[in-house]
Image: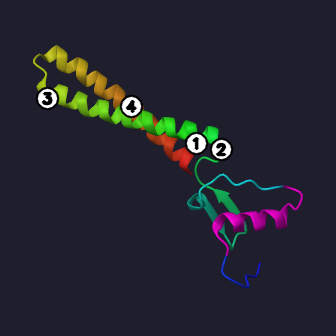
């Protein structure tokens, strides 16, 4: 592909490449230009992150869920410091362990959805 004027923006470049490879296919690009990755040497184009509105809504839900669990972890940590009995400390520590496990899963899911 030769560019005679200013190089096109990412989304229009993807459309040009798509039309060259699949002339009968109409491209509709939902992704933010920052999500579009181009490997000119390997002739590959891909989108990192969610590509549809449904995927974006799911992704945003996971992000919100992660924030809520992070807030809960902070509150539980404060509760653990202020716990008055050993049995309360054990219960709170159990909750901290559970929230930490959930956060680990959420981090993996978000990382996988982002790439």
- Counting from the top left corner in percent of width and height, residue 39 is at 66, 68
Pointer 4 or 2: first along the chain: 2
Disc marking residue 52: 2
User: Distance from label 2 to label 3 (Cα)?
Assistant: 44 Å
Report which residue position mark 1 lands on.
56
User: Distance from label 1 to label 2 (Cα)?
Assistant: 6 Å
Q: Are marks 3 and 4 in contact (CB under 8 Å)?
A: no
Q: What stretch is highlighted in magenta?
A: 8-25
At label 4, counting other C-alpha atoms closer than 10 Å, the crowd grade (few under 14, some 14-19, many 20 or more) is: few
Pointer 4 or 1: first along the chain: 1
- Counting from the top left corner in percent of width and height, residue 60 is at 51, 40
User: Distance from label 3 to label 4 (Cα)?
Assistant: 20 Å
In magenta segment, residue 86: no
**Closest to the observer: 51 or 114?**
51
Q: In which quarter of the image is residue 5?
A: bottom right
What residue is rendered at 24% in x and 30% in y?
75
Report which residue position mark 3 lands on.
81
């Amino acid at each position: 592909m030769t560019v005679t004027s200013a190089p096109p923006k990412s989304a229009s470049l993807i459309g040009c490449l798509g039309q060259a490879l699949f002339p009968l296919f109409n491209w509709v690009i939902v992704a933010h230009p920052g999500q579009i990755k181009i490997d000119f040497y390997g002739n590959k184009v891909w989108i990192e992150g969610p590509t549809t509105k449904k995927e974006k809504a799911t992704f945003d839900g996971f992000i919100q869920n992660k924030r809520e669990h992070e807030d809960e972890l902070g509150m539980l940590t404060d509760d653990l410091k202020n716990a008055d009995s050993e049995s309360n400390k054990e219960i709170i520590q159990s909750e901290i362990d559970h929230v930490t496990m959930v956060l680990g899963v959420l981090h993996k899911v978000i990382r996988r959805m982002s790439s």
